[in-house]
Amino acid sequence: MAYSHTNAKGVTYYLHGKKRVLKSGKESTLYYFGKEAKEGALDAVPAGYVVSETKNGLPVLKKA
């Protein structure tokens, strides 16, 4: 079950994560929210992060 967040406007977003390799060779994870649960959907918020909203109601992850 994908992690979902309903914003103040009542729109539901699902958390996704995508692994990528940087030019330096280090591995990094890109976290983003989408309106549909697709491939790469995460079950929970990663450790050390909290969900916040922008002024426009878009959910974002912030480091705790």
Image (cartoon, rainbow, N blue to C red):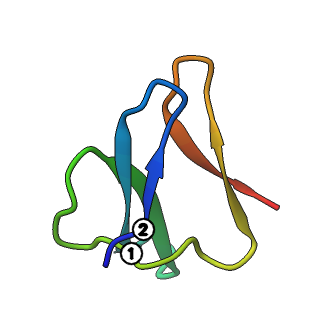
Q: Residue 37 location, x and y as percent?
A: 22, 61
Say whether disc 1 or disc 2 marks the residue closer to the N-terminus. 2
Q: Nearer the viewer, residue 20 or 16?
A: 16
Q: Nearer the viewer, residue 39 or 44?
A: 44
Quadrant into which the C terminus falls: bottom right
Q: Amino acid at mark 1?
A: Leu
Q: Answer above or below: position of 51 versus 55.
A: below
Q: Residue 40 location, x and y as percent?
A: 26, 73
Q: Amino acid at mark 2?
A: Tyr
- Label drawn at residue 42: 1
Of the two numbered discs 1 and 2 in the rendering, the one whose residue sits closer to the viewer: 2
- At a point 47% along the width and 51% down the height, the residue shown is 5
Residue wearing tag 2: 3
Q: Secondary structure at mark 2?
A: loop
- Asked if disc 1 and disc 2 are in contact, CB closer than 8 Å, the reply is yes
Quadrant into which the N terminus falls: bottom left
- At a point 41% along the width and 53% down the height, the residue shown is 32
Query: Label 2 neighbourhood size at 10 Å, few (<14), some (14-19), many (20+)?
Result: some
Query: Label 1 neighbourhood size at 10 Å, few (<14), some (14-19), many (20+)?
Result: some
Q: Nearer the viewer, residue 28 or 14?
A: 14
- At a point 50% along the width and 73% down the height, the residue shown is 28
Q: Secondary structure at mark 1?
A: loop
Toward the top, the furthest residue is 56
Label 1 – label 2 distance at C-alpha: 6 Å
Left/right of residue 47 with respect to residue 2 in the rendered view: right
Toward the front, the furthest residue is 10
Q: Residue 20 location, x and y as percent?
A: 36, 72
Q: Residue 14 location, x and y as percent?
A: 35, 56
